[in-house]
Amino acid sequence: MANSESGQPLAVAPQAYGALWRGLLRPLRTVAQPAAAVALALACGAALLAFNGYDARAVIDVMVLGVFQDTRSIAEILLKATPLILIGVGLCVAFRCSIWNIGAEGQFYAGAAAATAIGVSFNGLGAWLYVPLVMLAGALAGAAWAAIAGLLKIYFRASEIVTTIMLNYIALIMTSYLVTGPLRDAAAAYPQSARLVQEAWMPRILPPTRLHIGILVALVLAVVMYVFLFRSARGYALRVVGISPDAARYAGISVPRNIMISICLSGSMAGLAGAFEIAGVTRRLFQSISPGYGFEGIAVALLANNNPIGAIFSGLLFAVLRSGSELMQITAQIPQVLVLVIQGIVILSVVGFAVLRIPSLRPSE
Amino acid sequence: MSGRQLLLMDGIHKRFGPLIVSAGVTLDIEENEIHALLGENGAGKTVLMSILCGVLSPDEGQIIFKGQALKPGSPRQAIKHRIGMVHQHFMLVPNLTVAENYVLGQGSPFSVIRDMKTVHARIVELSDRYGLGVKPDALISDLSVGEQQRVEILKVLYHGVELLILDEPTAVLTPQETDRLLHLLRRLVEDGKTVIFISHKLDEVIRVSDRVSVMRDAKVVRTVKTSETNARELARMMVGRDVLMDLPRAPIEPGRVVLSVEHLNCDGESGLPALHGVSFQVRANEIVGIAGVSGNGQSELALALTGLLPIASGSVTLEGAELVGRSSHDINQMPIAHIPEDRHRMGIVLPLPLTENVILQRFDKPPFSSRGMLDMSEITRQTRDLMRRFQVKASGPGDRIQNLSGGNQQKLVVGRELDRRFDFLLINQLTRGIDIGATELVMHKILEQRSAGKAILLISTELEELFTLCDRILVMYEGRLVGEMPPDRGRLEEIGLLMAGKSPMSAA
Amino acid sequence: MEDLASLSFLAATIAASWRLAAPLIFASIGEVFSERAGVLNIGLEGTMLAGAFAGFAAAFTSGSILFGVAAAIAAGVLVGLLFAFFTITIKADQIVVGAAINLLGLGLTAFLFRSYFPSAGKGIDIAKPVHLPWLSDLPFFGEALFRQNAFVYSTLPVAALAVFVLYRTSFGLTLRAVGEHPKAVDVAGRSVALYRYGAVLICSALAALGGAFLTLAHSNQFVEGISSGRGFIALAVVVFARWSPIGAFVVSLLFGVFYALQLQLQAQPVHFLPYQLFQALPYLMTIAALIFVRNRVGTPSMLGVAYKKS
Amino acid sequence: EGAPFKMGLLVPGSVSEEGWNRIGFNALKGVEAELGAEVSYVELQQNPASFEKAFHDFASQGYNVILGHGFEFQDAALAVAPEYPDTVFLISSSYISEGNVIGLNTDTSQPFYLMGVIAAKTGKKAGLVGGMEIPPIKEAFEGFTNGVRSVAPDFPISEVYIGNFTDATATKEASLSLISQGADFVLPNASGATVGGFQAAAESGENVKTFSIFSDFTSVAPKNILGLYIADYARGVIRIVGDIKNGKKPTTNVEFGLKDADVMQFTYNDQAANPVTENVRKYVDEVKAKIAAGEIKTRQK
Ligand SMILES: Nc1ncnc2c1ncn2[C@@H]1O[C@H](COP(=O)(O)OP(=O)(O)OP(=O)(O)O)[C@@H](O)[C@H]1O
Ligand SMILES: Nc1ncnc2c1ncn2[C@@H]1O[C@H](COP(=O)(O)OP(=O)(O)OP(=O)(O)O)[C@@H](O)[C@H]1O
Ligand SMILES: [Mg+2]
Ligand SMILES: [Mg+2]
């Protein structure tokens, strides 16, 4: 997953044995490294538990056996992974263009709010039309919310790091306004929107679990974004802008245009994730619809070395950790916050291992 | 030259991954000499000098300075022994003043900076003594390249050196500046110092040095007394074959007007006016040179012609089509090619492989891409081909371009640009930093383009290059064209005066 | 709405602004050091939490605020060492490691808080307002400026010291050079890595102090996630302040003003606007301010880039 | 019938904070201690997407009672409940009664009504600091306002929301800002961040009055806290869960109020600088009796 070479299509002519060797070794390495990193992180987590008087074996029990115990558990992991993968993949695109979009959380909220607004508004539309419409609404709203930061950067040179952080807060506050105001379900005591019209619900793909088509869309988009970034002309232009805006200008590649493309793409993915969360899982908008998916998505992308295919795996990994932590709390009363610690250690050990083993991963000057 | 040994670098080995850049180099330097170091691009000169001043540590070998072994890989140690280096890429911090750059790394890290007055005074004194004209409170980022060069040299003097290393110090200087520098070096030797001088310009080497060491393939192949050799022989030692020092330029009558520039005015990146009413034409089958000290508007001219700098007024037509008002994207679609001045900033994308640098402007056009997708095997094939034709030394088309020596990077850029479809070729510094073998190659390629009917504008600070290639030379000073000359070496003096802003008439 | 214009309203707002700004001032001045040396430390949030928790835990068990401050600084230094080891020694991506630090900070403090302070209902005695003779009794300024606790006052000397260190010492000069042209520093015989370690440790220690302010000098308890995004705001402050310590002080204050103002405005008895509008005010104002001060310069050019010696 | 009786708890935040989540946790611990049940809990950080799964996790492991501590769990419980007809799903602060999903409600507006009465009788201006604008908070504030109005219709009341439940610093600053605008009775209600409000009162002198809610905060502001409203939700939950254990599943939703003296304790703090006078106490007792008897409505329903 953390393999920079896959990020750069080096079509070196195949020397038969070398290629074969690489073909075998590289996947092995890409799997072995994160696996070792995760094992190390879990061991650290277990040590932390043991040191503080908890039953450390629970970590192993839950993480290794518990989370995959039945179809439902697996479906729930995929369900959790959906927003993480979508946001992570989108952020890969932004980060490759050196756009430090910290605002996926806000874009997720924007997408969720728009999907809700559309999803409660029509009747008798038919799922075949309504479902894509809701997805589109989420993606567009996410892109639009991100575009604000893009435009501020282009026209006022305002750092997107700052503006996206601010826009996160504003999106959260706006959602709070929407569910206590315009979108509020009058019948409910809780500040929440009305339930989405049933035709707008994301079709489930593994009944009776809640798993819906979102995961498939996320996987497809990850592949599409990989091809876009590393195999398409436009993706190449975007990466050049990310590495050297001066060289881009020299080559006639429009820097503002690519800034907008990358930030809007990442925003639309986060917005889409928000739409899926609403139309696929909660069916309503709440004030706190995201438990920090947008921030976790940053880690997902970075852990994947900004490679969309890698983001699939890091997204899944984070989902497993989250699921496991809930289960750990239920079965062994281990504070769920431990998952954050484990996630942190996973990231550190992944970058640690990566730097130890692949010299080319070392950031260059 | 005293004949006593000052420095011995013995059996230095250094490799970067699989690449051997020093293969048991032995170099001995005598006290009080100017020792020139010659070699092709990538021969390992800079690496060797970096090892000497502790910036890189060798894998093997030892450095003996005044009979004492130096601890390898320690810049402090080198500084303590008064070994100072003026690097090919300047080691000046742009957001600090000259004086602040000089005190950088001096004294205890926890000391309070008090005595800036004394520092200023010493800088002024030294600057006056060697006639360098360095102002202590100037911000580095406000200085021209030539000025920065002098600031660098003075920095080393300020710190007090016994052994001064200069890595291609003349690459960006005017003839007058170069003369001054060479004089300065002689004065330093008279003052008891020793100099190692790296250059690709054989005439300078012949003029100033006492001895010459030639590097080839990561080794010092020979050391000779300068008085016992000549340029032709040195070139042969470097390249391993005879080098044509003077390229034959077929007499061709210039054809139609390809590029026409009229009353061009534009502002520089700082917002101050940089070009004032510049007018000239370039015809087919013609190479027009623009001479001038760097910082007199040449960079702005090149950027303006390619749409990278907004034009305030005036007109630029290419084959009759107006360029003013078009974006750089549009201008890229026109029959124009551009070899930029600062390849690290513009010409190449350092972390990307050669393949992805070759397609920089044409990535979205056939044969590099079809229906929006890059054709990687075609790109690789073309890159290999280009590497072969322009003798680019790299481990393969997938090598990151940052791993190439400057000369090889330049050859790739030249090759890439010449492969584009163009009628007008804009060159800003063709041979900066490239060795004589490569210089011969690229000059040859440029002359081929001239014969093929292309119109070429060559901006250069290198008069030798202009004399060799151009049909006529325009001189630029403070954003104006101040004169036109035929490429006649006999009128070097005149051109030099024009470049310095003096009218040859009044000077005469 | 007449009391909006009254002097006591103004005085209270100024006093609140300074208090609200204090944690931001510590953290953002710390970040100025780190970023000036070319290290982008987005782990401020996690570091602040570490400081908030360590300060609370130490003060709770020892009963001494000074001990709490020392513990917070120690925690900050530890977090800083971790961050520095990964970003400077191992040369891992700074943003990745910063993200990990944030996760670790939030997770570890919450985990330890639960494990060892299951019901800390009591809390600690926080730093008391310092009564300055004469000054505190001034009619308007007394209330606005001079009835703060030592933590709040200390933001002034901290900012002054930061300016002094950064612009008047050899250390500061080298630090600024490290963020612009590390190789030049290397060639000058100074260790780039060492200076970056120094900068990161200063950054983390100050951020931890900012966090400790929350538990030791403002509310008397640790609450999970008590920094509530202040670490991210501090990052924004640094950019807005153009990497200057004085700027960081002023911009933090500005942010404090916006925040204090929104609380005051919300509390006005007659308004027909949704309260969320007031909550959004600080963030909207920050964006507006960015638009007005367009065309910024001063980003350390090697920000976020690891330095490789060879 | 050898299987142990098991109860699970879902909370929307951290049980380590004094406040709403702790109340649920205490109930769980009470059930464990008094009914000998096997108990477990999970914290869900206000994230609706994870609610259903948590219910499933408990129910599929054979838990008899699952308490979703907060109305936000209602939807998820309704979705899961039909699959587990033998499990009872209790939902805090909900009025639901659908099959095996039963709402439990503590009418917080009742004690807050009393606080409103006290505020109006003893002060000049009241300030309320809420976490987020959610029903339990709004209901409480509505009760407070109605209490104030029953005594002094023109008594000024300001409300501020800090927008989260973690930023104790914001609660404190909001309270200080209310005090600076003349409020002499401030009442924070922001779960984990509540404590900041008491801190603000303590720092603002003895004339600022407040009331300790849900837990005992008197040590933070001993001079300012006029009294305590302690919610012993645990007692109520233990009662209901005990019934369930004995096979008596409630058939309608349950509402606790001032009538349940074991659940809602309303007492005074005599250490306060300006303790509530006997006269006022007597008046409050009368109101309390009327509320318990259902004669006074503390809020609209
Ligand atoms: N700035 C522009 N001005 C005029 N035409 C343009 C401009 N940008 C693109 N086009 C035209 O639109 C077509 C769309 O292609 P494409 O999207 O690759 O544009 P591009 O500018 O090359 O994109 P990028 O900026 O990503 O390189 C181009 O082939 C070109 O003909
Ligand atoms: N940091 C590095 N990593 C990898 N390879 C390097 C590095 N620095 C230099 N090289 C390689 O070492 C070789 C020698 O480089 P060096 O810069 O010493 O050449 P040079 O003789 O100075 O050439 P030029 O005349 O172009 O300056 C080149 O092939 C270069 O690509
Ligand atoms: Mg293009
Ligand atoms: Mg060199």
Image (cartoon, coloured by chain):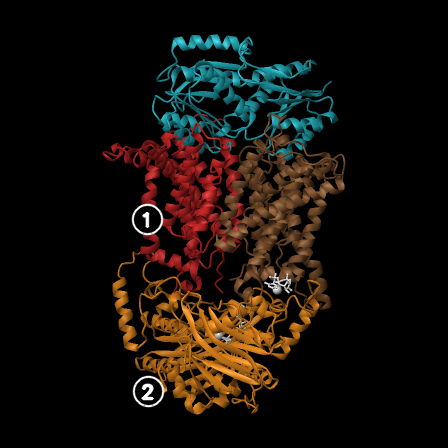
Do badges 1 and 2 share one subunit? no
User: Which kind of residue does numbered mark 2 sit on?
Assistant: Ala
Kindly identify the residue that appears in the image at 46 percent across and 46 percent down. C288
**Residue ID for mark 2:** B507
Q: Is residue A24 above or below residue D2?
A: below
**Colour representing chain C:** red
Between D157 and A262, the residue placed more toward the observer is D157
**Colour representing chain B:** orange
What numbered label is drawn on residue C161? 1
Between B290 and B353, the residue placed more toward the observer is B290
Kindly indicate the quadrant of the structure image that contains residue D196: top left
Q: Classify 10 Å Cα crowding around label 1: few (below 14), some (14-19), many (20 and above).
A: some
Q: CA distance from mark 1 to mark 2?
A: 57 Å
Question: Is residue A305 something that shows in the picture?
Answer: no
Q: Is residue C137 left or right of residue A280?
A: left
**Colour representing chain A:** brown
* Residue B353: percent from left, percent from top: 60, 66
Q: Which quarter of the image is occupied by the C terminus of chain B?
A: bottom left
Q: Is residue A135 above or below residue B207?
A: above
* Residue B414: percent from left, percent from top: 57, 76
Residue behind label 1 places its C-beta within 8 angstroms of ligand 2: no
* Residue A51: percent from left, percent from top: 53, 36
Give SS at disc 2: helix
Between A234 and B120, the residue placed more toward the observer is A234
Q: Depth-wise, is mark 1 or mark 2 nearer the camera? A: 2
Q: Classify 10 Å Cα crowding around label 2: few (below 14), some (14-19), many (20 and above).
A: few
User: Which kind of residue does numbered mark 1 sit on?
Assistant: Leu
Kindly indicate the quadrant of the structure image that contains residue D212: top left
**Colour representing chain D:** cyan
